[in-house]
Image: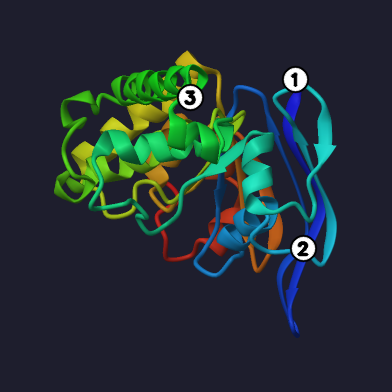
Amino acid sequence: MTSILDVKNLTLDFGGLRAIDHLNLTVNKGEIAALIGPNGAGKTSFFNCITGIYKPTAGEIFLTCRNGEKERINGLKPNLVTRKGMARTFQNIRLFSSMTVLENVMIGCHSITHAGILGAVFKDAATRKEEKYIVDKSYSILKTLELERFVNELAVNLPYGAQRLLEIARAMATDPQLLLLDEPAAGMNPTETRRLDDMILKIRDEKGIAILLIEHDMKLVMRISETIHVVDYGKKIGEGTPEEIRNHPVVIKAYLGEDIHA
């Protein structure tokens, strides 16, 4: 398999606290992978490191970019990481609530647009063509996630599950090779979670986007993941298929009190 993300010996220290400890992780093209672990295990810190929000203390991060080249992305700012082909969502919904659903997705296209200030002011032919492309592209993404009926609604008026999907739609607007989802099912009811399952599979199958997700809903993780990486206290303690992880003694011990067999 061809990898899209290679993380080698990633380490992150906050003063005397080691949040990530020599973590190795690979995500392959077209794969749905999960990163799981107890609260405080370092999962979101890992996402923050590989997307440029945190600067790792040590280790290497390599991303296979849109041009097919594998590049070291340590130290790149988040907007540059996005341009290279990795996008993410966050635990807490970060939509522009007073803007429409379509406008929220259009904002996600910002990193791949070329029109400058003069084009925006004078609306030359190239700028108008690009604006039409962005509108069409954004609407197409909404259709993929079955959100097109909300196209002109304010984001704040959407049902909670639809708001979560809209965040994913906005991330997809950046044309990612790899999509990072940070607890996408948080706060969802069972019906919304099942729909999310279907949408994640659809994104991978129809768009060819690899997905790495952090999630506490073990039913979701076990249903859709091909590879599961398990961390505890910043260290990887297990890796394998859902069936292998379900029966991994070290993982079961780390999840004592949590329903890993769900």
* Residue ID at (35%, 55%): 93
The residues bearing labels 1 and 2 have C-alpha atoms spaced at a distance of: 27 Å
Mark before the other along the chain sequence, 1 or 2: 1
The residues bearing labels 2 and 3 have C-alpha atoms spaced at a distance of: 39 Å
Marks 1 & 3, CB-CB < 8 Å contact:
no
Percent coordinates x, y for residue 154 in the rendering: 18, 44
Q: Is residue 254 left or right of residue 203?
A: right
| Colour approach in the figure | rainbow
Question: How crowded is the residue under tag 1: few (<14 C-alpha within 10 Å), some, or many (20+)?
Answer: few
In this rendering, the label closer to the viewer, 1 or 3: 3
- Where is 94 relative to 247, above or below? below
Q: Is residue 242 left or right of residue 65?
A: left
Q: Nearer the viewer, residue 121 or 141?
A: 121
The residue wearing badge 2 is 56
Percent coordinates x, y for residue 103 in the rendering: 31, 38
In this rendering, the label closer to the viewer, 1 or 2: 2
Secondary structure, mark 3, is helix
Question: How crowded is the residue under tag 2: few (<14 C-alpha within 10 Å), some, or many (20+)?
Answer: many
The residue wearing badge 3 is 127
Q: Can you see residue 179?
A: no
Q: Is residue 30 left or right of residue 106?
A: right
* Residue ID at (56%, 36%): 116
Q: Nearer the viewer, residue 143 or 129?
A: 129
Q: Is residue 170 left or right of residue 227?
A: left
Q: Quadrant of residue 149?
A: top left
Q: Can you see residue 183?
A: yes
* Residue ID at (59%, 55%): 251
The residue wearing badge 1 is 1
